[in-house]
Amino acid sequence: MRVAIIGAGIIGVNAALALRAQGAEVTLYDREGVAAGASRGNAGIFADYAVLPEARPNMRRQVPWMLLDRNGPLSIRLRHLPKLFPWLKEFIREGQPERVERSTQGLSALMRHVRSDWDRVLRENDAEDLRVARGALHVYRTRRALHAALCDWQVMGEHGVAYTPVMGSALQELEPALSTDYQAGMLLPDLTHALDPLGLTERLAEKARARGCEFRQTEVSAISSTETGVCLHFPGAGTRQFDRAVVACGAHSNKLVRPLGLRVPLESERGYNVTLPEPGVTLNRPVCVPDRGYYMTPMSIGLRIGGRVELGGLQAQPRWTRAEVMLRHARSVLPGLEPKGAKPWMGHRPSLPDTLPAIGPVPGQERILLAFGHGHLGLTLAATTGRLLSEMIFGTTSETDASACLPSRFA
Ligand SMILES: Cc1cc2nc3c(=O)[nH]c(=O)nc-3n(C[C@H](O)[C@H](O)[C@H](O)COP(=O)(O)OP(=O)(O)OC[C@H]3O[C@@H](n4cnc5c(N)ncnc54)[C@H](O)[C@@H]3O)c2cc1C
């Protein structure tokens, strides 16, 4: 079984390892090298608590307020609005209660396996030192704000997520660097996080190479089905034949998928981070500020403050003020925070309106498989996605019901 994987982000690299473990001859293509995209700069959270989709019934009321708040967690580049419109329409439709329920069930089916899949991948590839289990803390200014979020926490609890409310000064006992303006919190005692997301992807890529996967730094310009397999096309008219191809190009995947006749409503949710090599404060665990949409994650490379959503497409230049606003706010949450040496970064989350990734064969062209659209959860779901792809390609029975992720939902 000769398999081409296009895209060497955290998804492509995990797919390579899983397929190689089943004996496939794997070639991994990336136009820029390993982890050139979103996998380079994410917030490092293995967020297996995130069973609720982004689109929600109360969104119609909340989104206009978020957009009006220049410091809020969401912004839209007006120039991108016409292109964004079809995705936005789908996204709003996904806020209907029965669709939210379907996505929640689909996400929950995946999340149940995240911990064990990552345990296996990290153990088999000598990368356990790059993940730590210190839990996480979501912080709210007032008890009222926490109360407003309780319904969501209860749903997560029904799906097996462990959490404990923390009130008043108990918050600062957990995180002494936290401002006393924060009066309520939710502790997720079981959460794990990556100490260096880029380093993790690179380590796994190194292992894949050592196990015999071939790496090619080349752009793939098109894929086509042949009678017996698939054909990859490269700029300058070169081609190469494979038995199967996996599209794992993150937010850029539609360039290869659209010509196959499948319309996948993929959009970039641009996210920003700043990494502070010497933050001047210590966090014992990642701290999330939900009303501003960012995480502060203590990593081996410093404190990373990452999140926000900007809907602005793939081409527009980063607007670094988004990162500055986040950093400024983080300084009010952690009053001792030192911004010295802050390095800003922007990446494209590959997002589908129902918050579920697309994993599986293209309808009618079964030898081409999709593995993208993981949105805010690509790091979290990467090991599970790799396993699911190898099960689909080798026809082995799966313990995971990934039917909600099949690309046939877009056909
Ligand atoms: C600020 C921020 C914070 C985040 N925090 C978290 C978090 O805490 N937890 C979590 O689970 N997720 C998080 N995410 C999301 C996560 O980073 C992404 O979902 C994930 O990295 C997507 O991985 P990927 O492999 O699909 O795509 P990418 O990492 O974007 O990789 C795609 C690769 O494809 C290559 N490529 C594209 N087109 C072609 C082509 N035609 N030919 C060859 N190569 C091509 C690109 O060069 C790139 O290397 C965050 C994202 C952002 C932006």
Image: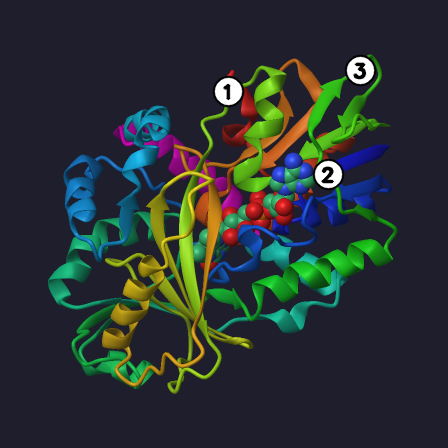
Q: Secondary structure at mark 1?
A: loop
Query: Badges 2 and 1: C-beta atoms under 8 Å apart?
Result: no
Which residue is depicted at the point 20% across and 70% down?
A: 184
Q: Which mark is residue 226?
A: 3
- Whether residue 395 is visible, yes or no, is no
**Image: magenta residue range:** 94-114
Q: Name the spot of residue 77 as percent of width and height, x first.
A: 31, 41
- Classed neighbour count for the residue bearing mark 3: other residues with Cα under 10 Å, few (<14), some (14–19), many (≥20): few
Marks 3/2: CA–CA distance:
17 Å
Q: Earlier in the sequence, mark 3 or mark 2?
A: 2
Q: Which residue is mark 2?
A: 5
Q: Which residue type carries mark 3?
A: Thr
Question: Is 134 placed left or right of 90 in the picture?
Answer: right
Q: Nearer the viewer, residue 273 or 4?
A: 273
Rendered image quadrant of residue 31: top right
Q: Which residue type carries mark 1?
A: Arg
Q: Which residue is mark 1?
A: 263
